[in-house]
Amino acid sequence: MRPLKAQHRQSDRQLARSRSFLEIQTTDDARQAIFLLELANNCIRLIIGQTNLDEEIRKSLLAQSAMIDMRIETARRNASILKN
């Protein structure tokens, strides 16, 4: 398993590549993408809650969802300083 910081750097590079793929060019584009990511993560948490999973797996998935929430919040803060 890779160290956590290496995983974050790779995730950040993937996010940067996906930004151009998604054609996010304006602040409104970024806000809409953030909203959709947040909506998707909330749906995932609902699915996790309604699925019969081993408790350790459930905890792991919810921890990953919490990490996604933190990254979404970081993206929201970064988007708030962008200019249209």
Image (cartoon, rainbow, N blue to C red):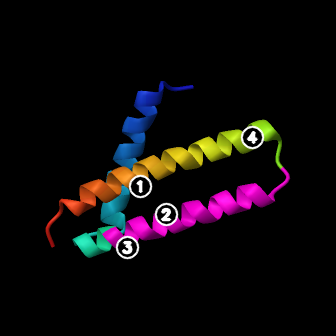
Q: Which mark is residue 32?
A: 3
SS class, disc 2 = helix
Is residue 67 within the magenta segment?
no
Question: On the picture, is 14 further left or further right than 63?
Answer: left
Mark 3 Cα shell of 10 Å, populated few (<14), some (14-19), many (≥20): few
Name the residue: 14% across, 67% down.
83
Write the start and end of the magenta stretch as one range: 31-52
SS class, disc 3 = helix
Mark 4–mark 1 Cα distance, whole angstroms, equals 22 Å
Q: Which mark is residue 57?
A: 4
Do the CB atoms of the residues marked 1 and 2 lie less than 8 Å apart? yes
- Residue 15 vs residue 30, the one in the foreground: 30
Which residue is tagged 1?
Answer: 72
Q: Amino acid at mark 4?
A: Ile
In the image, residue 21 lies at what x, y percent? 35, 65
Compared to residue 53, the image places residue 22 above or below, namely below
Which residue is tagged 2?
Answer: 38
Q: Amino acid at mark 1?
A: Ile
Name the residue: 37% across, 37% down.
9
Mark 2–mark 3 Cα distance, whole angstroms, equals 10 Å
Mark with earlier residue (2, 4) = 2
